[in-house]
Image (cartoon, rainbow, N blue to C red):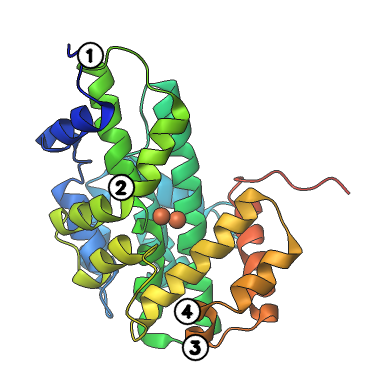
């Protein structure tokens, strides 16, 4: 155990170790890559889901949830595909695949993982809603996963901190504010590395890497979309302050997308609706 090395030095060493990289199984990667195709092969998806009991369970549970429920109970993946359609089904699969990476036994890490998972799902849903709302047909399919993965650098860092604790390389528990500052500073770069490591498309790596950069490619509409939705979700998480919507409406991202203050307010309502339907937020008492 080192007496003199700084937390950042220990972290840098830890990040070089393979064990710090959050793992996506081959099947998860295959599913993920199939789901984001323009014309996903539903037969192939059905086959891949069936080999993963936790994904099967999640998809069936969600297909029967009040949000998606039809008249009859759904018992098979085939029925779920028919009820939900490939895009909604794809979104549920992505949620299920990623949920597995957010189950630390350490209470501090788990709390941050939970916050990150909720934020990621809301950004995914917000991005999906916005792409549809703005008729960005070519981006609808990728928008959900782009929102879901934009902050995965945080997952990478949380995994590294967890390993540092279990490997007993830190003398003391570092202050949570310091850990949060480090995560806030380093997650874009590490997110880019992680998404490339998962062999996902370059467009998704760029979003992970550039979603906080002061300078960004204004021709990249998906990047502008995720940046805009991220701002809305962050604002909602901080508390619903009216004046911030006007600020987001005057941002470069809103300008690129051509989304108005009313459009942003509608996005917020759609995200809140989803939050309630997934049980991520308790309904306000009347
Ligand atoms: Fe971020
Ligand atoms: Fe974010």
Kindly report the distance in space between the C-alpha atoms of the residues bearing marks 4 and 3.
6 Å
Which marked residue is nearer to the observer: mark 2 or mark 3? 2
Residue 27 numbered mark, or none: none
Label located before the other in sequence (2 or 3): 3
Mark 3 beta carbon near ligand 2 (under 8 Å)? no
Label located before the other in sequence (1 or 2): 1
Q: Residue at x 42, y 46 (%)?
A: 58
Label located before the other in sequence (2 or 4): 4
In x, y percent, where is residue 13?
13, 32
In x, y percent, where is residue 111?
48, 31
Label located before the other in sequence (3 or 1): 3
Residue 131 numbered mark, or none: 4
Are the two marked residues, 4 and 1, in contact with CB atoms closer than 8 angstroms? no
Label located before the other in sequence (4 or 1): 4
In x, y percent, where is residue 1?
17, 11
Q: Residue at x 14, y 53 (%)?
A: 197
Kindly report the distance in space between the C-alpha atoms of the residues bearing marks 3 and 1.
51 Å
Residue topped by disc 3: 135
């Amino acid at each position: 155990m080192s007496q003199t090395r700084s937390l950042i030095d220990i972290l840098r060493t830890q990040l070089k170790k393979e064990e710090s990289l959050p793992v996506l199984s081959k099947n998860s990667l295959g599913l993920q890559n199939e789901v984001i195709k323009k014309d996903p092969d539903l037969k192939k998806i059905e086959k891949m889901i069936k080999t993963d009991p936790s994904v099967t369970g999640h998809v069936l549970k969600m297909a029967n949830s009040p949000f998606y429920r039809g008249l009859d109970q759904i018992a098979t993946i085939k029925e779920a595909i028919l009820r939900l359609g490939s895009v909604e089904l794809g979104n549920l699969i992505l949620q299920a695949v990623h949920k597995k990476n957010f189950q630390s036994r350490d209470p501090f890490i788990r709390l941050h993982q939970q916050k990150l998972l909720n934020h990621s799902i809301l950004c995914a849903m917000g991005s999906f809603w916005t792409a549809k709302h703005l008729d960005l047909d070519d981006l609808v399919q990728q928008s959900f996963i782009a929102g879901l993965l934009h902050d995965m650098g945080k997952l990478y860092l949380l995994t590294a901190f967890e390993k540092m604790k279990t490997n007993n390389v830190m003398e003391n528990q570092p202050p949570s504010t310091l850990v949060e500052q480090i995560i806030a500073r380093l997650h874009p770069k590490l997110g880019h590395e992680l998404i490339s490591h998962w062999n996902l498309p370059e467009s998704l790596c760029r979003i992970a890497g550039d979603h906080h950069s002061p300078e960004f490619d204004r021709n990249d509409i998906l990047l502008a979309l995720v940046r805009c939705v991220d701002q809305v979700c962050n604002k909602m998480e901080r508390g619903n302050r009216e004046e911030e919507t006007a600020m987001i409406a005057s941002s470069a991202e809103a300008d690129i997308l051509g989304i108005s203050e009313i459009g942003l307010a509608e996005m917020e309502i759609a995200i809140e609706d989803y939050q309630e339907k997934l049980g991520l937020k308790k309904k306000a008492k009347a």
